Image (spheres, grey):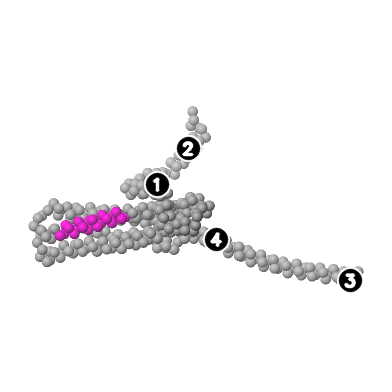
Amino acid sequence: MEALITYLADESTLFFKWQGLVGSFVGVVGALLVTFLGFVLNHFYQKRKQVRDGVVQTEIALALGINDIYDTERHLADFLERLNRAVIQPLRSNENPGQYFFNKTNFPPLSIHIDLSLLKAKHRSYYVHNKVLIIHKNIEQANRMFREMKVEYESVIDMGRFLITRGATPDNQRREYLINNQSFRKFVIDMIAQLQIAKKVFAQTKTYNLKLLNKQRITVWRLEGISFKFFCNKKEIEKYKGTLHCLDRIDSVIEDEVNKLMKEVEERQINPSNQDKTRRSFKECVKTIYNETKSKLGFFRK
């Protein structure tokens, strides 16, 4: 009997030792699993947040860029008006004949802002990514062109001064000064025409980026996704998703939305005061909601 008791005591002690060992092992493994799971979840959260921040950052940058384009267009239009009034029209009407003519106006400082960090942002959309690359390249060229335009206009003024110092007759100086200013005027008009193209590219990108911002995943998948679509070979897949042809296809699908956005922006630029017409006081909003609720409940029905 004593031997049985001793045996059971030894077995119980061994069992408790193994139980403690297994418990320690499970505790360590559980802690490692929880840590690993937390790391994975945090990784996916940070990745998702990075994409979301990229979409929001793109939206802000596009809005600022569109405003800069319209401001630039307005400044150039004002410059043309001043140039016509101060230089071209007086020369065409031959005011003060027989005298040297040296009227001029100021060329405005111009620049269109685009956030360079957009090039590194994660968009989760090859359409937005390619459009951002196109925008960055075109805006970079436009800003360089603005600097060259300022230098070009200063050279037109310097040439008019040079003809006077070289002893050209007033008629020759006036004629050359008119020709040079008219040539520069055409240059500015061509630049304004290029801005119309830039406005549309910005509007296309902004329209599609809003779909990402508003989480219209089905619409984005329908336009960009390749799953559940059938292709004969890999070449057709690449043509569908990885070439400029795919951009043209999406451009045609969102054309109406783009035109609507551009029309709204144009109206805000022409009549900025209209932006405040829809704003109402808190009291008016409460009253409107109260009346709408009563109407839905049938209090206004006869």
Relative to 135, does residue 278 appear above or below in the rendering?
above
Residue beneath label 3, please?
Answer: 3
Residue 256 marker: 1
Q: Where is residue 301 in the image (x, y as percent from the top left)?
A: 49, 30
Mark 4 or mark 1: which comes first in sequence?
A: 4
Q: Give the range drawn in magenta.
A: 176-195
Residue beneath label 2, please?
Answer: 292
Q: Do the residues labelled 1 and 3 touch (CB within 8 Å)?
A: no
Q: Where is residue 163 in the image (x, y as percent from the top left)?
A: 13, 64
Instruction: Tell me which amino acid carries mark 2.
Output: Glu
| Viewer-side label of 2, 4 | 4
Instruction: Tell me which amino acid carries mark 3.
Output: Ala
Marks 2 and 4, how far apart in space? 43 Å
- Helix, strand or loop at label 3? It is helix
- How crowded is the residue under tag 3: few (<14 C-alpha within 10 Å), some, or many (20+)? few
Q: Is the magenta stretch mostly helix, strand or loop?
A: helix
